[in-house]
Image: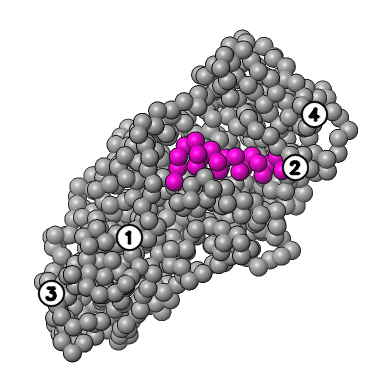
Amino acid sequence: MAAGISIIEVMSRKTKKDVGALVRGSGVSFRVWAPFAHSVAVSGSFNDWAEHPLESENDGYWAVFVEGAEPGQEYKFVIKNGDNVYHRNDPRALHFTTTPGNAVIASSNFDWEDDAFTPIPLEEQVIYELHVGTFNRPDPAIIGTFQDMCDKLDHLAGLGVNMIEVMPIGSMLMDRGWGYAIDYIYAVESLYGGRHGFLQFVKAAHKRGIGIILDVVYNHFGPDENLDLWQFDGWQENGKGGIYFYNDWRAETPWGSTRPDFGREEVRQYLLDNVKMWLEDCRVDGLRFDSTIYIRNVKGYNNDPSNDLPEAWSLLQQANELSKKINPAALTIAEDVADNEYIVKPTSEGGAGFVSQWELGFPHSLREALHSNNPADINLSELMTQLTRRFIDNPFSRIIYIDSHDTAANGSARFNEVISPDAADNLFARRQSLIAAALLFTTPGIPMLFQGEEFMESGSFSDWQSLDWDKAVKHAGIVQAHADLIALRKNAGGVSAGLTGCDINIMHFDEDNKVIAYHRWKKGGPADDVVVIVNFGDKLHVEYLLGLPRNGNWRVRFNSTAKAYSPDFKEAGVAEVMVENGTASIVLPPASVLILSQDK
């Protein structure tokens, strides 16, 4: 763009298609947005790193077609603004040599074979959150890759997981990290296996009936001092980040002054095209938006109009509308942490339009209820609230979990480590963990496991400590217990349809003995009605009287004290419960969960 164009004019510009490096027949077209540049060139291995000029399109964009350029070749843009020269990587690069390094021209070709995957219905989805670098790392000296994850897909399929939530995979400056300090949102981290490795992983998961949810980070980029996007074409105000960022107080985030300018049309399109790429080109089945509260509010506050960003709210609405247009079954998730129902309200009602949002209260209530075997220390009040909680009268508008990458780190630890420090797989930890898992899979909502939870992984989550897969063998019974619970949650055996329903009724609360029971149903009746009985206390009740929804024989579908799950469990053999005149006498083991339903 010629000098003298005002920032107001720049912000009013519309974007165009085919931005980035795109293979076209006998060469590659390059297009980049650099509205304050005086000249732009592209140099790369296709021209011995000479400067091939781009032509201004008089709207902030510069473009050229380079004959003979092809996939696999490296490139950079050379941007001149006055006397300053900037060698920048393509903001839309799909691959890099290393990080930091050079952008690489990527082919759009990928053999999806006969992939036509569609996620199962929302009410039967079970999510498994994982981190690529640590989920499976056969060589301790090398971070995990997409191929390493593929090697464990059969484990997840056998567990019953049907959705995997992958922590961010965007290109990072460091060789390890959680993924939330992303530099290039279009490129897949090369050390993980790059774009091709990710597509192979998606295809392999789909073949096993597993959908992929990808964690995306749009609340900030950075850190700023290492960002190619920072003052990309030399322009900035107030010492801030230039064309991709706010250049005033709105830039500030807990992670640096790198909040994207959600009001600038070209930046909005940069983000929306990224949503489109993941869903359309990479065939992911959902997106989890990191820290949406820091997208919609400068300070990360709820109900704070003075710091709200209306343009960010409208961007979230657009992103969700776009997602549904591309894939009506796409699961879009917000990490908002503010319990704001407008996050999941339809855009037609002024909501952001997300399908679901993370529920932080649930894991905290489990810790309060299960951290001790002393009845006097057991606090069930918050748990009772969490069992029935929902947004917009839709239980599937919340993702519930025992642990996530946040609760298992950030100064805390995994659930079993918190309740049993330094002995995270002892008898108490195993017993309480199965109670927590049973609550997770029988509470209305979309349940999520965190990597290693099913085999008692200990400690805190970090970006370097690999999962100890030997524990999956050591605690094979605990793994089986999770598989059994997931099968019930999905009604795989046709005897627990109520767990896929929306309804719950807490039918019994015995504060003295710390016993609760609740009823789940979809349509009601045999093989539908499910009753969950939880004894948080330390007493064995040989004849515990409890009212059930219907007379007749009820079968115990899950008993958390079964020796099949751990040989040192003190199993109370309960196979059936007979209900007469609406009441049953039940053998109720200490610290246990029983899940009951009737045959058809």
Look at discs 3 and 4 and give the one toward the viewer: 4
Q: Residue at x 50, y 42 (%)?
A: 279
Question: Distance of mark 3 from mark 4, alpha carbons?
Answer: 77 Å
Magenta range is 265-285
Chief secondary structure of the magenta portion: helix
Query: Is there any visible trace of residue 178 in the rendered image?
Result: no
Marks 3 and 1, the one that precedes in the sequence: 1
Q: Residue at x 52, y 50 (%)?
A: 324
Marks 3 and 4, the one that precedes in the sequence: 4
Look at discs 1 and 2 and give the one toward the viewer: 2
Question: Distance of mark 4 from mark 2, alpha carbons?
Answer: 25 Å
Any magenta on residue 16? no
> Label 2 sits on what residue type?
Lys
How packed mark 3 is, by other alpha carbons closer than 10 Å (few <14, some 14-19, many 20 or more), is: some
Task: Write down the residue under mark 4.
Answer: 58
> Label 3 sits on what residue type?
Glu
Report the coloring of the rendering. Answer: one colour
Q: Is residue 212 left or right of residue 257?
A: left
Label at residue 416: 1
Task: Write down the residue under mark 3.
Answer: 576
